Amino acid sequence: MSQQLEVGHDAAPSPAADPPSVSPSRRLLLGLCGLFAVWVLVVPPFGGIDEHDHAYRAAAAARGQWAIDPVNATRGTGAWLEVPSDIVDAARAECKNLSYTKDRDCVGTPAGEGTTRVASGAGRYHPLFYAVIGTVAKPFHGATALYLMRIATALLAAAFVWVAARAASTWARTRWPYVGIVVACTPVAVYSCAVASPNGAEMMSALALWLSLVGLLVAPAEHIRRLAAYAAVSGAVLATLRPLGPLWCLMILAVVLVAVRAEPDRIRSLLRRPAVLLGALLVLASALQATAWIVAMDATRIGVEGDGHSSLAHRISVSATQLPAWTFQAIAAFPLRDQPTLPVVYACYLCLFGLVMALGLRFASARSRLGILLVAGFALAFPYLTTVKSLDQFGAAWQGRYGLPVAMGMVLLAAYALDRRGHHLRGPMCLLLALLFVVAQAVAPAYGLFYEVRHSPQVDSSAWLQPSMVLTVVVAAASAALMCWGAFGPVLSVKERARAEA
């Protein structure tokens, strides 16, 4: 199969000759929401990764329990929460089905007024996200409340994807930035946005921050205020959602400054804009308050501490064996954190990622290549070095999806580099990339459903709104195809063609 990669030198057609088209961001967002809906239904209530922990935290935060006592309530971390008994009862079957939970996690003790005192591994996390999704679900009970938490999480993630697409539209000359958004939405990222936890929103807020910061350096001046608002909101949320958020914000900013070539005095002129300064102050304030919370609550404590004293050489070698696992986990790991999916999903996504990266590195400037290499090095070195340091205490606790907010920068910078060169992807290669994405995104939830039907204790429960296999595959494939249609697009709009000629 061959590719045709051309520079668009054709004259832009007149507006009358250009057929009406739907915004790429609308098609992309509609397709992504379809994938979210599939995953919301495929995973049984409370069957997501540590979803009972997060649901407890959300229900408690929505009822005013923001400040907590950071005691070792479960697995050497977490906190004790007072949660509505109907939610604890609804979560019990999935909770007890896990190998690492005890009665303190799944049963708890009565606390009066329809509540149960129960341990949550997410009890030390910042309460803001949990208060939002918990408040949405507050009028509901049991599994229904959990589904509302999932929907709220998915809508929040979708909002940040919309911000990312709108940010890209201010500076894109080609469809490559939209392709970058699609490729950044790995199956595990999509899955994470459809369960009640902050991981998915963290990934998508990082996606919006990457593209907003690029826009601040290269977009026309009339878009600066809007891009500053996008960067401020996405950066403030990213800094708050999870304990590593402030570090992710700092790393993304540093890489964009290295990889993106701005006009002379662009940064100096940005620092004179009130909107940019206010946005920077908002992100800084969010990062500082998040850091204060992390320190006060010891929120980076990730689990049971061991008492081993292995040699440095042993820790170095054992940590090195985890590198392939982290790579695959960044593509797909569900319904449990260490549960692999079918090999075809990994094969398709590795090919998809490899093709985009090969093209990006081929046509990127030296600065963009350096930025891509910095992201790749950090995405591997940070978990490796932290695992070497903490292996005796916490084991191989890192999961590949944790690093996605930074790791997705590789494909986004490759898309930026191709866009700056004005290259348009056409012909069989375009169809190949779309096919790889559709197959990966359709097979992943299909296998997830297959696995859950055979292992979930709720397989015969009316609480699980279980879809059929045919519906799962059809909707997932159609949604992924719609995302690709929005990203690749058959025809560039007049505005996009004019930018490519500029």
Image (cartoon, rainbow, N blue to C red):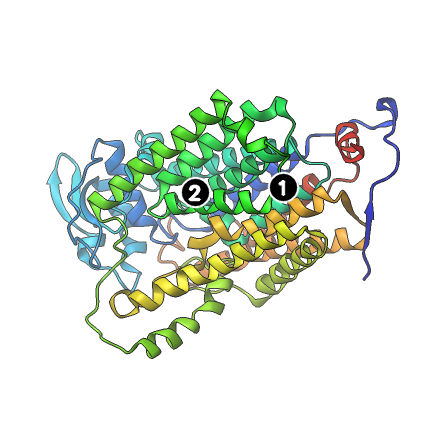
Q: Is 28 on the left-hand or right-hand side of 54?
A: right
Q: Where is the N terminus found, in terms of image quarters?
A: bottom right
- Nearest the camera: 157 or 148? 157
Q: Is 111 on the left-hand or right-hand side of 489?
A: left
**Label 2 CA crowd tier, 10 Å (few <14, some 14–19, many 20+):** many
Q: Residue at x 43, y 64 (%)?
A: 339
- Nearest the camera: 408 or 57? 408
- Nearest the camera: 462 or 42? 42
x and y, in percent, of residue 381 in the image: 44, 62
Name the kind of residue labelled 1 in the image: Arg
- Nearest the camera: 372 or 258? 258
**Residue 72 sits in which quadrant?**
bottom left
**Residue 352 sits in which quadrant?**
bottom right
Q: Residue at x 54, y 23 (%)?
A: 225
Q: Secondary structure at mark 1?
A: loop
Per the image, the residue denoted by label 1 is: 261
**Label 1 CA crowd tier, 10 Å (few <14, some 14–19, many 20+):** some
Q: Is residue 133 visible?
A: no
What number is the disc on residue 249?
2
Q: Residue at x 44, y 51 (%)?
A: 43
Of callouts 1 and 2, which one flags the residue occurring earlier in the amino acid sequence? 2
163 shown above or below 176: above
Name the kind of residue labelled 2 in the image: Cys
Q: Where is the C terminus found, in terms of image quarters?
A: top right
363 shown above or below 150: below
